[in-house]
Amino acid sequence: MEATIEKQIKNAGDLVHTAEESLLEIEDLTITIDSVKKDLVKQIDLSIKAGEMLGLVGESGSGKSLTATALLGLLPSSLQITGGTIRLGNHQITSLSEKEMRQVRGKEIAYVSQNYQSFFTPFIKIGKQFVEVIQSHSPTKKSEAKKIVRYWLNKVNLPADRVFNSYPFQLSGGQLQRAAIACAILLRPRLIIADEPTTALDVLTGEKILDLLRGLQKELNCAILLITHDLKHVMNRSDEIAIMYGGQILERGRTCDVYQNPAHPYTRLLFQSRLQLSKEVTKELRTIYGEPGLIAEKGCPFARRCPYVFEACNEIPQIKTVSDAHWVACHAAN
Ligand SMILES: Nc1ncnc2c1ncn2[C@@H]1O[C@H](COP(=O)(O)OP(=O)(O)O)[C@@H](O)[C@H]1O
Ligand code: SF4
Ligand SMILES: [Mg+2]
């Protein structure tokens, strides 16, 4: 019986995941505070291939969550998309109605956040909540839905029977985040957005959650947008990496290319300032000058913190190709 469910679930997934060059394509996206006409996210370009992981990295306040919120069609009414397009598969997200967007959320895009505590309703058992998710998307007998839920709880390495019959407060943080991930992948989405999924967890539990996501991505051929402020979360996991600062993408490329040849001063400082447990603790840790969120009003957004700033930086830098699929926005880059 278990094998039959597994086959059904796999087949359903195969129907959804067709081979596409790029599953998600964000072009020129600009998000603006309507009342004061201030751009918080400026003309960003991002794409993710089907089944791949993109790491979106940047300090707090750089615009990562706003980008994710725009993808989900959930920006607050005070903020507006004032430019650009977002395409997911055949959907032009920016032109869907709220009713159409509801279909896309959950079924095609799933969302995992740091707030796993609020993912589940507190006083309803986990299993019942999963069953409701399945039944709200397709008519499924309760007994069948229960088997599907157990399958996915096992998949994220949770004791399925116990978790199924538990209330959210009876699980640890790590278990609850695993359950949230199981619920996110239940409907076989094509894209999972994981926005700082480990921030509220201890380091080792967080690492295990990130490894779990990477494993599921490979096994289910599901694309992941992994948002983090911590470069080391994505270094050995994501296929591509995008560095964000002041609402703009400063560098973008295959992770191995960016690692071997970081071209933007901000990327290089991020590499230098990350804590390397393998190095001697006495060695001084390089920090990035200035407060996070110090954004230049015009020209390069990093100009107020950049050690290499010069006159030309008053103008917005053009995109320069570093190597195939690796580019940077900096006047000083060759
Ligand atoms: N609803 C909002 N109204 C006004 N400004 C906002 C709103 N949401 C976020 N911001 C601002 O937009 C910037 C980017 O926020 P956010 O995307 O949450 O950053 P990140 O996720 O990278 O930490 C921040 O300066 C934040 O204060
Ligand atoms: S454009 Fe200028 S200020 Fe910006 S990162 Fe490059 S050198 Fe620094
Ligand atoms: Mg955020």
Image (tube, rainbow, N blue to C red):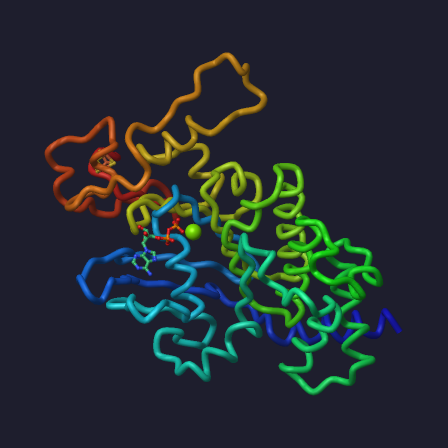
Tell me what residue is drawn at x 62 percent, y 61 percent.
Answer: 221
Can the viewer see residue 324? no
Residue lying furthest left in this view?
Answer: 311
Tell me what residue is drawn at x 51 percent, y 67 percent.
Answer: 20
Give the percent coordinates (x, y) of residue 188: 63, 69
Residue lying furthest front in this view?
Answer: 123
Where does the N terminus fall, quadrant-wise?
A: bottom right
Pick the front one: 202 or 269: 202
Q: Is residue 190 left or right of residue 271?
A: right
Q: Is residue 311 left or right of residue 255?
A: left
Count of numbered badges drawn on the protein: 0
Figure quadrant, ligand 2: top left
Give the percent coordinates (x, y) of residue 208: 67, 44
Residue 258 to residue 91: above or below? above
Can the viewer see residue 86? yes
Tell me what residue is drawn at x 50 percent, y 54 percent.
Answer: 195
Pick the front one: 328 or 246: 246
Pick the front one: 198 or 1: 198
Residue lying furthest right in this view?
Answer: 1
Where does the C terminus fall, quadrant-wise?
A: top left
Q: Is residue 121 left or right of residue 143?
A: left
Give the percent coordinates (x, y) of residue 12: 68, 76
Give the percent coordinates (x, y) of residue 209: 64, 48
Query: Within the image, what quadrant is residue 32 found in?
Result: bottom left
Tell me what residue is drawn at x 71 percent, y 52 percent.
Answer: 175
